[in-house]
Image: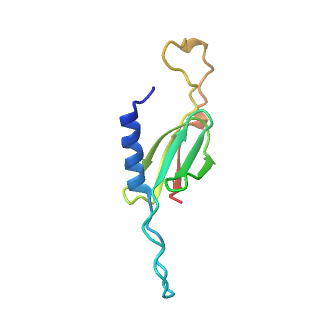
Amino acid sequence: MKRSLPTSVACCALLLTACSKPAPVETSGQKPAGPPVPRIYVSDEVAGDLSIIDSVTFAVTNIHLGKRARGIHASPDGNLLYVALSGSPIGGPNVDESKLPPPDKSADAIAFSTSP
């Protein structure tokens, strides 16, 4: 399913808010490191990756999770990210589902990670 830009932007804004950790507090007398740097989290259904993008430098870190990383949800405290994984083949509009390979139910899972 193709999402419109406003929905994608809203999802990213939610994840930026929910998953950005505050900068560490320096206790050795130096100034704190500054405000938290928002991150953008993107699931890649084809590669099975989670991409973490630094919103200031645009540096990208990819983490391979498994088959069809599809949806992302942050825990209420923002310390965990949950990503839905699916072993079902990618179909879509106008695809004859009878010609798709059978689903790999062993790949269905929820991946989770602490927010880096």
Number of numbered discs on residues: 0
Above or below — where is 47 with respect to 92? below
Q: Which quadrant of the figure has residue 98? A: top right
At a point 50% along the width and 20% down the height, the residue shown is: 92
Res 75 visible = no
Quadrant where the N terminus sits is top left
Q: Residue 7: give x, y in percent of width and height.
A: 37, 36
Above or below — where is 44 with respect to 41? above
Q: How is the image coloured?
A: rainbow
Quadrant where the C terminus sits is bottom right
Q: Residue 3: give x, y in percent of width and height.
A: 42, 30
Q: Residue 30: give x, y in percent of width and height.
A: 49, 84
Q: Residue 59: give x, y in percent of width and height.
A: 59, 53
Of residues 41 and 107, the one drawn nearer to the viewer in this rendering: 41
Of residues 110 and 36, the one drawn nearer to the viewer in this rendering: 36
Above or below — where is 90 with respect to 74? above
At a point 36% along the width and 36% down the height, the residue shown is: 6
Res 46 visible = yes
Q: Is residue 65 left or right of residue 13?
A: right
